[in-house]
């Protein structure tokens, strides 16, 4: 699924919902899947964009720490959707089955 919702700028009130300790855990509103929500957008995407700029169109923001509530921009990477699915696969040893030559 491509992310098309505009990302709001990170404001000082963003940090009111965060506890910084390794992973920066979001303690504000969350969606049904457990991702933090900030101003109608996923909090980890807001944090990523604030530090790294917007990810390429259609790419996902991946939690390297595997914590959906983490907004630590050092734990977040932009990933192509195919690679992101593999990173969340139950069978990561099968990564070789996928072609990652994205022509970038």
Image (tube, helix red, strand yellow):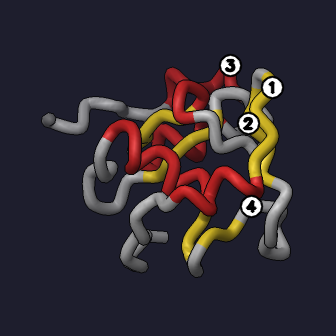
Q: Quadrant of the C terminus?
A: top left
Dots 1 and 2: beta carbons under 8 Å? yes
Mark 4 surroundings: few (<14), some (14-19) or many (≥20) residues within 10 A:
many
**Residue at which label 3 appears:** 93
Mark 2 surroundings: few (<14), some (14-19) or many (≥20) residues within 10 A:
many
**Residue at which label 2 appears:** 24
Residue at image location 48% in from the left, 38% down from the top: 83
Residue at image location 55% in from the left, 56% down from the top: 12
Residue at image location 53% in from the left, 34% down from the top: 73
Q: Which mark is residue 21?
A: 1
Q: CA distance from mark 3 to mark 4?
A: 27 Å
Is 72 above or below relative to 22?
below
**Residue at which label 4 appears:** 35
Among numbered discs 4 and 1, the one appearing first in the sequence: 1
x then y, percent, for residue 21: 81, 25
Name, please, the residue furthest toward the front. Answer: 12
Mark 1 surroundings: few (<14), some (14-19) or many (≥20) residues within 10 A:
few
Q: Nearer the viewer, residue 73 or 55?
A: 73
Q: Secondary structure at mark 1?
A: strand
Q: Secondary structure at mark 3?
A: helix
Left or right, 32 with reference to 18? right
Q: CA distance from mark 2 to mark 4?
A: 13 Å
Q: Nearer the viewer, residue 64 or 19?
A: 19
Q: Is residue 36 visible?
A: yes
Q: CA distance from mark 1 to mark 2?
A: 6 Å
Q: Nearer the viewer, residue 60 or 5?
A: 5
Is 42 above or below relative to 47?
below
Q: Nearer the viewer, mark 3 or mark 4?
A: 4
């Amino acid at each position: 699924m491509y992310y098309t919702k505009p990302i709001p700028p990170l404001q000082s009130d963003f940090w009111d919902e965060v506890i910084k300790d390794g992973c920066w855990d979001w303690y504000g509103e969350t969606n049904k899947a457990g991702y933090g929500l900030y101003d109608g957008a996923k909090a980890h995407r807001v944090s990523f964009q604030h530090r790294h700029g917007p990810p390429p169109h259609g790419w996902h923001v991946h939690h390297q720490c595997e914590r959906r509530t983490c907004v630590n921009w050092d734990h977040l990477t932009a990933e192509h959707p195919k690679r992101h699915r593999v990173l969340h696969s139950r069978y990561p040893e099968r990564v070789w089955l996928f072609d990652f030559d994205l022509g970038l």
